[in-house]
Amino acid sequence: MVRSRTRGPLVLGPNGTRRLRDDHVEGTDPLAMFGRHAADDLRRHDLRRHDRLPHVGDILVNSRIDVSTGEVAAFEKLVGRHGGLGGWQSRSVLIHPADWPVAADLVGADSVHRQLVAWLERLGQRRQLPEMNRTVR
């Protein structure tokens, strides 16, 4: 992902480009093989998530995915692929007591974090945080 001065944030692939501000695709969608939430992981509320982070790099690089195995390639010699797009790591599980309310669909790190904080607050284990500290800008 890069930012164009005229086209906004763009995802570039070997055979296509996806303009993130309006999801316009030229050629083959470079996010298609990374799952239905790939574009949403890059955005929240009409802005793309990574593009809004205060210290994001100029170029966001994601590894390739082997669609036959669901494996993504790591850039380091570790087993984990924390924070990337695609592969089995995208199918997470959050186990909690059945009587704990879930506010909404838990898609992406931000929504999971908000839910965990809400449970802590409900249990009296964490004070309400100022709104500016609870969201990614």
Image (cartoon, rainbow, N blue to C red):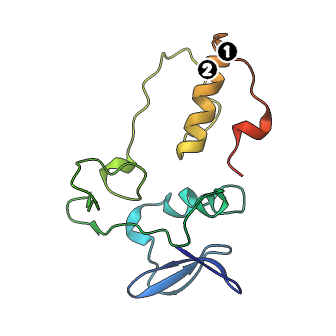
Q: Which mark is residue 119?
A: 2
Q: Which mark is residue 63?
A: none
Mark 2, other Cα within 10 Å: few <14 / some 14–19 / many ≥20: some
The picture places residue 12, in percent across and down from the top left corner, at: 48, 81
The picture places residue 28, in percent across and down from the top left corner, at: 44, 84
Query: Which residue: 54% across, 64% down?
Result: 39
Q: Toward the viewer: 28 or 109?
A: 109
Query: Which residue: 57% across, 27% down?
Result: 116
134 over 34 or under it: above or below: above
Query: Which residue: 67% across, 75% down?
Result: 22
Q: CA distance from mark 2 to mark 1?
A: 5 Å
Query: Which residue: 63% across, 64% down?
Result: 51
Which residue matches tag 1?
122
Mark 1, other Cα within 10 Å: few <14 / some 14–19 / many ≥20: some
Q: Give the quadrant of residue 115.
A: top right
Which element is circle 1 on?
A: helix
Which element is circle 2 on?
A: helix
Q: Is residue 30 left or right of residue 66?
A: right
Residue contact at pointers 2 and 1, CB within 8 angstroms: yes
Q: Give the quadrant of residue 92.
A: top left
Q: Give, as a three-letter code, the residue at label 1.
A: Arg
The picture places residue 52, in percent across and down from the top left corner, at: 67, 60
Q: Give, as a three-letter code, the residue at label 2.
A: Trp
Q: Is residue 29 left or right of residue 123?
A: left
5 over 110 or under it: above or below: below
The picture places residue 97, in percent across and down from the top left corner, at: 48, 15
132 over 130 or under it: above or below: below
Q: Toward the viewer: 116 or 137?
A: 137
